[in-house]
């Protein structure tokens, strides 16, 4: 008899029609999975098989726009979710109102939030919003109130801390959020959760996972206590998503995800020399192929819309095969060998908010004479995804697992190191630079200077012109602390052209490759939030703080002179932070207004709590969001 192994995860919700969603599950045997909603919506899908595991991504059609409806998961006629003994609220799907629509009386009454199977009432909309739609939809009591969206984001989550079973890093922010929302159905909740990398740690496993690894192979042989193959990757997702509160949260809050290095290995694709060294080991090929296979199954598929799934030849081939393992293995091996054949980046729309999630790991060009964060095809796609149809969005979010703007000293060190590795000071310095690059993890945007400059110019273009959005926010993680920084464009400083990159143009300086004194009209920000559950040594904390200091900036300028790197096209200062701890940021976007909150998970006698560290308006009109002005 087939059962539910993992999930359900609510992944995609269609913000254009408010009528469609996708739900991901893993089952114990081949079967047909049904999602049945209380409002009559639903969908079915047969499972597909990979490496002895069975999965389904169910497209749910017929949802009521502007509603919150409970759902259940069935295999055959048997309900497998929610569990019979669950004390958590029903899992729900919240849909936005279709453009121009107003709530119906039935939706306003919240009548569609009872459990589809057992009739458990929740006492009104499951998220406490009126009439159950996303942030701002009807919340003011007026059907004409501007619709909005709440986007929570973070990265770097150990599901279980490696070591002796103790947790030295404090409460898990995702678990704490889940516990809070489950205990208080009226609490304000995100409309979408962005997971910005390191959802699993393939190279830093817990004691429990190591026991499972030791039961199948000799841990004295490479890769030791790191995961080796697809089966072992499934252990990581089990550990990450099986916590009851987190499982409920992910069944109720839609999520978008992108990988970072630890999803595969620390410093993944740092350099061409790094790649050559790893490819020479006997275990690496299986590791990278399994890492990409498991990411495709557990994370990437859910990022796609039903239309994109229908057009995906790999998805079609895997589903059509009795066993999709070899189809997916070939795809993953080709994706590693020739990254230009695969695009992991994607675009999502949340009303008047556009999200462009950028792959900053697999799409790199590592040859020193052509080094780039994004290969030309990927860069062209990102440019088009950002700039096309600018009048259709008020806020642009760019998800990049790696921060675009770092503390100035660290930025200058990475740019200097890239120049050394490229040979600007000769072969001896180049060899030193490669050793330093690997030892100090110098592989963010600044370590790809041409890509940094072009990405900076792309953001300036996106924030310029008559159709410019109110805000352009780069959302990042990776660095195990949180901070806010805002760039400005000095007059007369040369900016790189975009004329060699195909795609739309915007603004008078677009494609010129010449001096540009025109600053963007949109507010452009780097918002960095990490970790969800991890740690950072005190010495590194001190280093990050020093990186913002006046002395640190002077050292950075000296390194720039030594490396002959020239000046960056922008300058920036710290607008908030650094904050250290397990944390999540949330953007509340309503009309052309934007506000930011930062919460940290803290231990107390009553258990883990979420403590508000920051509430800040990002646009002048945001008193309506916070009830008072906290503009930064």
Image: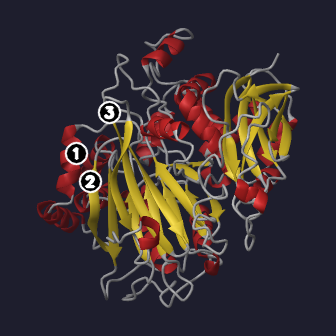
- The residue where tag 2 is placed is 578
Q: Mark 2, residues whose alpha carbon is within 10 Å: few (<14), some, or many (≥20)?
A: some
Is 493 displayed left or right of 152 in the figure?
A: left
355 sits left or right of 110 in the view: left
Q: CA distance from mark 2 to mark 3?
A: 20 Å
How far, Cα to Cα, is label 2 from label 1?
9 Å
Give the residue at mark 1.
Answer: 541
State the SS at label 2.
strand
- Marks 1 and 3, how far apart in space? 21 Å
Q: Secondary structure at mark 1?
A: helix
**In the rendered structure, are the residues bearing label 2 and label 3 in contact, judged by CB atoms less than 8 Å apart?**
no
Q: Nearer the viewer, residue 133 or 356?
A: 133
**Which mark lies nearer to you, 1 or 3?**
3
Label 3: few (<14), some or many (≥20) within 10 Å?
A: some
> Residue at point 35% right, 20% down?
163
Q: Earlier in the sequence, mark 2 or mark 3?
A: 2
Q: Is residue 500 above or below residue 67?
A: below
Residue at the image position 41 percent from the left and 72 percent from the top: 623
Residue 2 percent across, percent down from the top left: 80, 20
Q: Are marks 2 and 1 in contact (CB under 8 Å)?
A: yes
Query: Which is more toward the observer, 87 or 575?
Result: 87
Q: Please, which colouring scheme is shown?
A: secondary structure
Return the mark for residue 603.
3
- The x and y percentages for residue 522 are 45, 79
Earlier residue among tags 2 and 1 = 1
2 vs 1, front mark: 2
Q: Give whichever of discs 1 and 3 has the lower sequence position.
A: 1
Is residue 372 visible in the rendered image? The answer is no
* Residue 331, percent from left and from top: 71, 41
* Image quadrant assignment for residue 516: bottom left
């Amino acid at each position: 008899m087939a059962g539910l192994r993992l999930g359900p995860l609510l992944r995609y919700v269609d913000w254009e029609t408010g009528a469609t969603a996708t739900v991901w599950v893993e089952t114990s045997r081949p079967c047909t999975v049904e999602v049945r909603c209380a409002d009559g919506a639903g969908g079915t899908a047969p499972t597909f098989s990979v490496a002895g595991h069975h999965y389904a991504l169910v497209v749910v059609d017929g949802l009521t726009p502007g509603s919150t409806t409970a759902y259940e998961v069935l295999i055959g006629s048997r309900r497998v979710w929610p569990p019979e003994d669950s004390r958590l609220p029903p899992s729900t799907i919240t849909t936005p109102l279709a453009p121009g629509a107003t709530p119906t009386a039935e939706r306003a009454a919240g009548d569609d939030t009872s459990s589809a199977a057992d009739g458990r009432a929740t006492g009104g909309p499951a998220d406490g919003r009126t009439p159950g739609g996303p942030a701002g939809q009807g919340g003011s009591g007026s059907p004409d109130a501007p619709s909005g969206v709440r986007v929570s984001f973070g990265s770097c989550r150990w599901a279980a801390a490696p070591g002796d079973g103790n947790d030295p890093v404090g409460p898990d922010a995702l678990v704490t959020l889940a516990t809070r929302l489950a205990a208080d159905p009226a609490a304000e909740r995100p409309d979408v959760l962005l997971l910005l990398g390191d959802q699993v740690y393939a190279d830093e496993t817990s004691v429990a996972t190591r026991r499972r690894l030791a039961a199948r192979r000799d841990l004295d042989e490479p890769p030791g206590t790191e995961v080796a193959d697809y089966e072992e990757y499934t252990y990581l997702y089990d550990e990450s998503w099986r916590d009851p509160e987190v499982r409920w949260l992910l069944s109720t809050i839609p999520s978008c995800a992108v990988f970072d290095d630890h999803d595969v290995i620390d410093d993944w694709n740092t350099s061409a020399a790094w790649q050559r060294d790893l490819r020479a080991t006997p275990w690496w090929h299986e590791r990278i192929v399994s890492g990409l296979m498991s990411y495709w199954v557990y994370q990437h598929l859910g990022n796609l819309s039903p239309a994109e799934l229908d057009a995906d030849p790999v998805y079609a081939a895997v589903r059509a095969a009795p066993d999709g393992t070899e189809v997916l293995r070939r795809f993953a091996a080709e994706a590693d060998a020739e990254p230009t054949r695969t695009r992991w980046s994607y675009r999502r729309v949340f009303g008047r908010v556009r999200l462009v999630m950028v792959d900053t790991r697999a799409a790199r060009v590592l040859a020193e004479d052509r080094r780039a964060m994004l290969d030309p095809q990927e860069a062209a796609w990102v440019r088009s995804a950002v700039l096309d149809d600018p009048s259709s969005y008020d806020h642009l979010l760019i998800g990049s697992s790696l921060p675009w703007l770092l503390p100035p000293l660290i930025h200058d060190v990475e740019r200097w190191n890239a120049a050394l590795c490229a040979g600007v000071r000769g072969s001896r310095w180049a060899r030193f630079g490669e050793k330093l690059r690997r030892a100090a993890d110098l592989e963010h945007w600044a370590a790809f200077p041409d890509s940094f400059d072009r990405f900076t110019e792309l953001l300036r273009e996106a924030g310029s012109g008559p159709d410019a959005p109110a805000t352009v926010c780069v959302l990042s993680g990776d660095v195990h602390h949180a901070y806010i920084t805002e760039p400005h464009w000095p007059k007369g400083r040369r900016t790189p052209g975009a004329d060699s990159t195909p795609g739309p143009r915007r603004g008078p300086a677009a494609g010129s490759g010449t001096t540009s004194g025109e600053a963007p009209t949109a507010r452009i920000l780097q918002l960095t939030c990490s970790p969800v559950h991890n740690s950072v040594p005190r010495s590194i904390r001190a280093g990050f703080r020093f990186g913002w200091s006046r002395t640190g900036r002077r050292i950075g300028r000296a390194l720039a002179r030594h490396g002959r790197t020239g000046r960056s096209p922008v300058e920036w200062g710290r607008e908030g932070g650094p904050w250290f701890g397990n944390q999540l940021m949330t953007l509340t976007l309503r009309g052309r207004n934007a506000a930011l909150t930062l919460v940290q998970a803290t231990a107390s006698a009553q258990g883990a709590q979420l403590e508000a560290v920051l509430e800040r308006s990002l646009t002048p009109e945001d008193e309506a969001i916070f009830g008072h002005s906290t503009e930064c």
